Amino acid sequence: EGVTITDENLDKFADLMILVGEDVPDEARTFLDWVYGEPEISNRAESAVRVGGRRWDLYLKSPSGKIVVKLPEGDAAPSFRRLAAAQAREGLMDKAISEIDLREPDRITVRTRDMGDEAAQSIKASYKKP
C-alpha cells in the first residue's frame, strides 16, 4: 500500500522513482511491477508521468542525457520486454536519443538528439527490427 509523500523531509526518499499524476496512487503498484521486472530499465528509471489517466511517460537516465519513453495505454508489460530486448541486442538506451516511443506494438520509434547528421544517421542505421 503506497502513500503520497509530501514536500518535507525528502532526503530519505532520494533513491525512489518520482511518479506524477492524479491517478498515480491507484496505478503505481502495477507500473512499478513493470519497471522493476526489467532490471536494465529500473536501473535507469528516474521518474514517470501519468498522461491523461491512460498511459505513462517514463524518464530514464542515459549517457547522453534523459530519455523519455512513451508507453502504450493498458498493459505496458510487453513494451517493457521489447525495450529490454532492444537494449540487450543493440544498446538502444546507450545511444544519443531523446525519445523512445513504444505505443505501437509492432515498432520502436526513436528521436535522436540534435547532434549533427552523421551521428544521427549512424543511430538510425543501427536499429533494425528483429
Image (cartoon, helix red, strand yellow):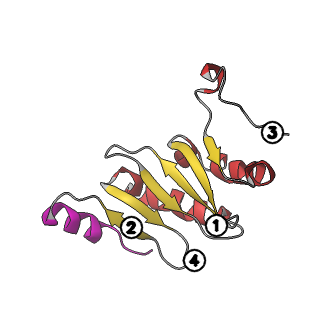
Residue 110 disc label = 2
Highlighted magenta segment, given as a residue range? 117-130
Residue 127 x/y as whole percent:
35, 68
Secondary element at tag 2:
strand
Q: Is residue 1 above or below residue 86?
A: above
Which residue, given by chain and number where applicable, does mark 4 sit on?
Answer: 105
Among numbered discs 3 and 1, the one appearing first in the sequence: 3
Q: Is residue 99 left or right of residue 74?
A: left
Q: Nearer the viewer, mark 1 or mark 2?
A: 2
Secondary element at tag 4:
loop
Q: CA distance from mark 3 to mark 1?
A: 25 Å
Secondary element at tag 1:
helix
Q: Is residue 91 left or right of residue 70?
A: left
Q: Image quadrant for the C terminus?
A: bottom left
Say which residue appears at 35% left-offset and 45% top-offset: 65
Which residue, given by chain and number where applicable, does mark 1 sit on?
Answer: 78
Q: Is residue 118 above or below residue 8?
A: below
Among numbered discs 1 and 4, the one appearing first in the sequence: 1
| Residue type, label 3 | Gly
In this view, the residue farthest toward the front is 7
Residue 2 disc label = 3
Q: Image quadrant for the N terminus?
A: top right
Q: CA distance from mark 1 to mark 4?
A: 8 Å
User: How many other residues sit within 10 Å of disc 3, few (<14), some (14-19) or many (≥20)?
Assistant: few
Secondary element at tag 3:
loop
Of 99 and 42, nearer the camera is 99
Q: CA distance from mark 2 to mark 4?
A: 14 Å
